Every structure is written in C-alpha cells, then in structure tokens.
Amino acid sequence: MDTSPGKSIFDLILWVEDRLRECEVAEPRREALFMLSHLMGIKPTELLRRFSHRMNGSKVAVLDEWIERRARCEPLQYILGQTEFWGLSFVVDASVLIPRPETEHLVEEALRLLRAMPPEEELRVCDLCTGCGCIAISIAREIPSARIVATDISPAALNMAHRNAELNMVEDRIRFLEGDLLSPLKDYRDTFHVMTTNPPYVRREELHDLQPEVRLYEPALALDGGEEGLSFTKAIVEKGPCYIRHGGYLVVEIGHGQKEAVVEMFEESDEFEQVWVRKDYSGIDRVVAGRRR
C-alpha cells in the first residue's frame, strides 16, 4: 500500500485484514483491529468512531512491518509487546510464555480459596514458574492483603514479571526470587496459604507438533514438561507441600489428558486430605487442587 499521508482507518483495516488473510492468519479482522488500535493508542472498540481518521505514512510503514512479522508466524502479542490477562495489561516478549485465557481458571480457583479464609489474616501466596507474573499479579490486584512470593528459573522472565508488577501497581506486595522450582523457598517452610503454578507440561515429543507461533517463538523452557509432560508437576506435588501451611492449598494447571495422572500424584503423596479438579469453559480438565492435611 502507498504509505503517503491520508489513508483512512477504514481503508487501513481492510488492507491489513486482506494482507493477514493472505498469510493464512486465523482471525485476520480481529488482528487487524488490534494492530490499528495499538498503533493509535486506543481500544479496538473506539476504532468504530474513527473510521475517517487519517494516518500518516510513517505509521502505515509500521503496520507493514508488523504484517511481515506476522507472516513469519510471530505471535501478535510479541509484535505489539503487550497482551491482556484477567482484564489487566501485561508486557510480553519472547522470554516469557504468552498468558492463555485458560489460566484464568487457576486464578479463579486460587481467589475462591483465599477469599474463604479469615479476613484478619495476612494471606501468603507462592506462584511457581511465574513467567510474566500474570497469576501472581492478578491475585495481588484482587486480594489487597496478600503478600506473594513468585519464582522462576529465568532471569529474563523475572525481569518481565517485575515490569508487569510495576505496571499494575503491585510491586510492593510481590517478591520475585530466581531459582529452579522450589529451590528459592528454603526460608518459607509451612508459610503459604495457597501455592499456585502453571508449570511446563507439554510432552517433549509433542513440542514439534505445536502451532508454529508457539514452536518457533515461545520459550521451550516454559513448555517442555519432560518425556511425559509431568516432570515439573511431579516435583511440585511431591516437594511443594512442606512450604504450604497445614490446611493450605496447592493449585496446579494441567494439560489435556493429564487429570488422572496428576490426581494420582496428589493422592499418593499422603500430604493432601482433599483433591479436586476444575474444568475450563471448553469442558477440559484444567486445574487440579489439593488441601494439605
């Protein structure tokens, strides 16, 4: 498209949509609206009132670059450097997994458990494999009394999580610790009311079958769950309870078809007196939770 000044928003939406459709993007209209709204600094719904607004050539050139990147299967969230989760804004890049809507079910379950606890208590929460920090930050925004420890093995991910905590104004209530799974928690035995985790849970042999947006761009460190996809989950269920208060909870996100194996892990650990499963809106078993004896 000619990048000279004067192209209307309406024309640009059609142009971007056509280009994305040629690239076989699944939802070209939706992504076109997100690109235009992000470039203008407004919400996608506000574009409807600005169809006649004119955009200069330099901004059209940015759109052209974004389309080229999207044609190479780079996720839209990485291109824009931003995504939403739990109604909050998060900055993201290729150092962190892009938050999925399904993970909001884990947040919902953790909040349900925390809100049932005595209101006078200062609630302690731990989020393992925090990535961009979406779980820890969402809980901190919803529970002002919560004090949260969030861990990750990746320094780059922790840097991103800290930026997101500042962006969402909860940095004073989250402590970020670098280390492998539970290793940073040696000073936190019997501490947490709720421990959450969305660990890597893709079977190693299935990594090459993932969508190109995931396989080529998202960090393998946040995806590879070992031969059976459950290496990290098993370690957390076995060793995590000693950091949870008696009567506290472990809440774990799981992959498709993993319910039976993960429930069995909980039941065989002898640390949990209750274990239950929560489905997502598609009817897929998404969260396994247990109450420490």
Image (cartoon, rainbow, N blue to C red):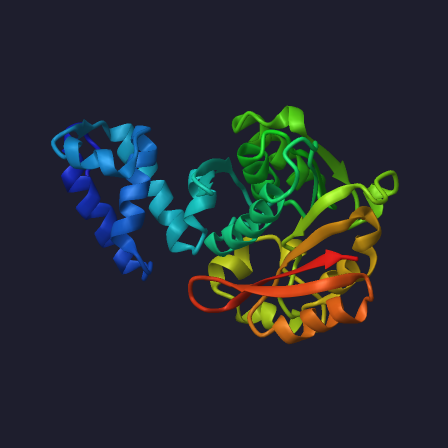
Q: Residue at x 74, y 60 (%)?
A: 232
Using the image, determine if residue 162 lies above or below residue 151: above
Q: Quadrant of residue 241?
A: bottom right
Q: Quadrant of the C terminus?
A: bottom right
- Residue located farthest toward the left when viewing the structure as drawn: 52
Q: Residue at x 57, y 69 (%)?
A: 208
Numbered circles on residues, count: 0
80 displayed left or right of 26: right
Residue 194: horizontal and vertical position, in percent? Answer: 69, 46
Q: Nearer the viewer, residue 43 or 111?
A: 111
Q: Nearer the viewer, residue 39 or 185?
A: 185
Using the image, determine if residue 167 lies above or below residue 291: above
Residue 1 seen in the current view: no
Residue 92: horizontal and vertical position, in percent? Answer: 52, 40
Q: Residue at x 64, y 54 (%)?
A: 222
Residue 102: horizontal and vertical position, in percent? Answer: 49, 56
Q: Nearer the viewer, residue 46 or 147?
A: 147
215 displayed left or right of 233: left
Q: Residue at x 23, y 33 (%)?
A: 46
Q: Nearer the viewer, residue 54 or 100?
A: 100
Q: Quadrant of residue 251?
A: bottom right
Residue 213: horizontal and vertical position, in percent? Answer: 47, 57
48 displayed left or right of 263: left
Residue 293 seen in the current view: yes
Q: Quadrant of residue 154?
A: top right
Q: Quadrant of the N terminus?
A: top left
